Structure formats: structure tokens, C-alpha cells
Amino acid sequence: MAVLVTVLAVVLALFAVLVAGLLRSHAEILRALHGLGVDLDPDAAVPTLGAAAGITVPRPRGEPRHAVDISGVTPSGDAASIAIVGAQHPTLVAFLTSGCATCVDFWSAFSEPGLRAPGDARVVVVTKGEEAESPARLRKFTPPAVPVVMSSEAWDAFDVPVAPYFAFVDGPSGAVVGEGAAASWSQLVGMMDQALADAGISTKTRRGRRADGGRAREARADRDLLAAGIEPGHPSLYPTSDAELGGES
């Protein structure tokens, strides 16, 4: 009986040492991640960049990366497909979540009128799919003038490691010019401006222009045409004779 008690005591002691070692290793891992600015939010689908870290995390340079078009659904449940590759304008893809504390500042920034995006880029917000996000919660954050697409496939295609995360895509080439994580809008602008400069893309003439300036002009032109009774398909929009083209040469 004494031998059995001794054996059980030894086993319990060894088990206690094993558990203590595991707990210590777990604590060291958490401290290391915290030191890197990564906050493991239990309510988020992916690790998030801690706002207190105050750092930007650009992806290290390597082989050129190419973007993909974004397909998924909106928070309202409508099918959505946004062409990025081959577009005539650049696109800033923002990967956000509804449970990330740092993401809240970007949701707010994207709701501001006259937003100036780096490089005059169009902004597209991409969240995880319905298996990881609540559409009802996302609808509370959705900006009025910025498209929001729920697509876990896009997160996988862009290899997103943390939220918030951003990728600047050159439309005509489809190349990802710059990408990384940032904790504030000013840090994001600085990171992307540096990436554009490294790629030889000037931003000096773009900073003073509104990112939605071209779209606003198109909207005004459409309104003026409609006011004049010229609707899509009107014959005057499609000249078919020399007279309509301005006469013979």
C-alpha cells in the first residue's frame, strides 16, 4: 500500500511539473506576441494589430505579388464582384473586421466625406465571410460611399496575416505595389506613400485631389444629361453619320 501511494505521489508530481512547463511556455508566447503588437482578440476571426503598438508592419519584399478580383456578398446579402485587375485606376483594399478595436478608426475614416486615399486609389473594404462575421454587425459599420464585400476567399488570396491589413493594387498591371498592417490612418498613408515612391509612382500631384473627384464629375454629367432629356441609349450619344460627327472633312 505504501508503495502504491509513493508511485501515485511521484506521478502527480511529474504531472504538476508538466502542466507548469506548458503554462510557462504559453505565457512566454503571449508576451512575445504582445511585444510584436499582435492582440489575439478571442472575438475576432484573425489576430489583430494592437492599437497601442503604434507601428506599421509592411510585408517584406520578395517575389512580385499579383492581386485578384474581389467576389463575395455585401453585408445586406447581395452578390458583389469588384474588378481590380485591369482597372484603369488603383485600388486600396482594406481588410477589416467588426470585432477589431483598431479597425474602428478605419471604419470611421472611410465614412468621412471627401476621403483622400493614398495615390488617389479607390477604397474597397473586405471582411471575412458569413462563417466568421455577423452581417448585422457589419451593417452598422458600412460606410455610405465605400463598398464592403464579405469574402474569406479574398483574405486567402491576399494571404492576410492580421487585421487591419491593407494592399495597394496598381489597376492596369494588377500588381500589389504595397501592403502591410497599420494602426492609424496617418501611418497607413505614410506606409503606402513610401511604397509608391519605392515603385517610382509619384504622389505629389495626387495628394491635393479628392479620391472621388472623377466619380463626382461623372455623376454631375449624368445628372445634366438626364435634365436635358438625354437618357442612356439616346441617338445623340451614338453618332452614325458624317453630319452627326461634325460634317465632312
Image (cartoon, grey):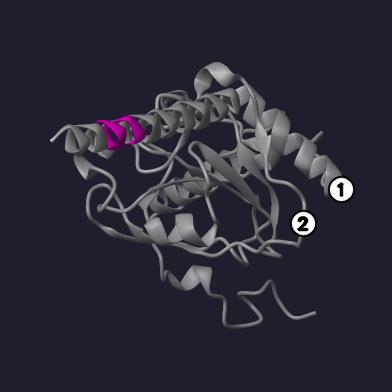
User: x%, y% of residue 183?
Assistant: 56, 26
Question: What residue is pinned by disc 1?
Answer: 200
Amino acid under disc 1: Gly
Range of residues picked out in magenta:
9-14
Which of these two is toward me, 205 or 163?
163
Tell me the residue at 63%/67% (across/down).
86
Q: Does the magenta-highlighted stretch encompass residue 11?
A: yes
Decide: is 71 above or below 180: below
Mark 2 lies on residue: 62
Residue appearing at x 68%, y 61% in the figure: 65
Name the chief secondary structure element in magenta.
helix
Near-viewer residue (193 or 101): 101
* Magenta stretch: includes residue 187: no
The answer to whether one can see residue 206 in this image is no
Q: Horizontal and vertical percent for residue 194? A: 79, 36
- Residue at the image point whose x is 64% and y is 77% from the top: 243
